[in-house]
Image: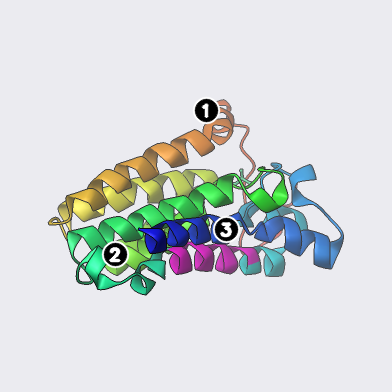
Amino acid sequence: TVYSLTALLAAYLFGSIPTAVWLGQAFYGVDVREYGSGNAGATNTFRVLGKKAGIAVMLIDIAKGYTATNLAYLIGMSVTGPQNSVVFVNYQLALGVTAVMGHLFPIFAGFRGGKGVATLFGMVLAVNFPASMLCVLVFVVVLLITKYVSLSSICAGFTFPLSVVFLFQVSIKSEVLYGMCVCILILVTHQKNLERLLKGKESKVYLFKKKTN
Ligand code: G3P
């Protein structure tokens, strides 16, 4: 229907808001894509512009995914069925993934965006709260142990479908399917990180103390 297509377009536009690029340019006069890993995401903003900017980008990017996913509530239930029905959740997931596409290929920043982790997390937060909390736990534990954000993102990405299958809400099979797509998407966007990880050349992120070398 017209409404559902409009919502998908809105989700893409939401996702397209290049938070890292705009925040860097507006407050620091810097395009983060020219420094560090070259990625327009929270991690690289943290790396290039510091903790405050990194956290702001992370929160806004999560909000993009969360809001876009919940645009499903604006569409009449006659179309999506009752909330938490399979059709409704499918629609939420489609909106979330569309927002992630906007984040990866933002129309407002020359189609050069980020890797989609925070925006994907916003989607998971909206569709499956317990699974999202488990993803956070895995992310934080891997980060504290290894100091690699990319590896933490990949592990958290795998946690989503696995936790849906083994712990929460097995009834909604499309969540598992989308979850597997999330894993593949994260692996694809982190290809360069994976190469660096395998060569032992990935940069580490220290949350609590300054890098000494
Ligand atoms: O969220 C992206 C993160 O997993 C890796 O970012 O800048 O280290 O490539 P970066």
Give the class, few, some or many, for how many residues have Cα within 10 Å of label 2's Cα (few <14, many ≥20): some
Residue 132, horizontal then vertical, whole percent: 35, 63
Query: Which residue, as the protein is rendered here, is positioned at the far left?
Result: 171
Q: Earlier in the sequence, mark 3 or mark 1?
A: 3
Q: Is residue 105 left or right of residue 110?
A: left
* Helix, strand or loop under label 3: helix
Vertically, is 178 above or below 189? below
Question: Residues in magenta?
Answer: 57-68
* Mark 1 Cα shell of 10 Å, populated few (<14), some (14-19), many (≥20): few
> Could you tell me how far apart the alpha carbons at marks 3 and 1 are, in whole angstroms?
35 Å
| Residue drawn 38% across the image and 45% down it | 182
> What colouring method underlies this structural image?
rainbow
Residue under the point 58% across and 68% down: 60
Badge 2 vs badge 1, beta-carbon distance below 8 Å: no
Q: CA distance from mark 2 to mark 3?
A: 23 Å
Q: Nearer the viewer, residue 205 or 116?
A: 116
| Sequence-first tag of 2 and 3 | 3
Residue hosting label 3: 13
Residue pointed to by mark 1: 198
- Foreground residue among 102 and 178: 102
Between disc 2 and disc 3, the foreground one is 3
Residue 65 is one of the magenta-drawn residues: yes
Q: Amino acid at mark 1?
A: Leu
Question: Mark 2 to mark 1: distance in Å?
Answer: 32 Å
Q: Residue furthest right?
A: 29
Q: At numbered mark 1, what does the secondary structure look like: helix, strand or loop?
A: helix
Residue at numbered disc 2: 128
Residue at the (67%, 43%) spot, across then down: 112
Instruction: Check disc 3: other Cα within 10 Å, few if <14, some if 14-19, many if 20+.
Output: many
Q: Earlier in the sequence, mark 2 or mark 1?
A: 2
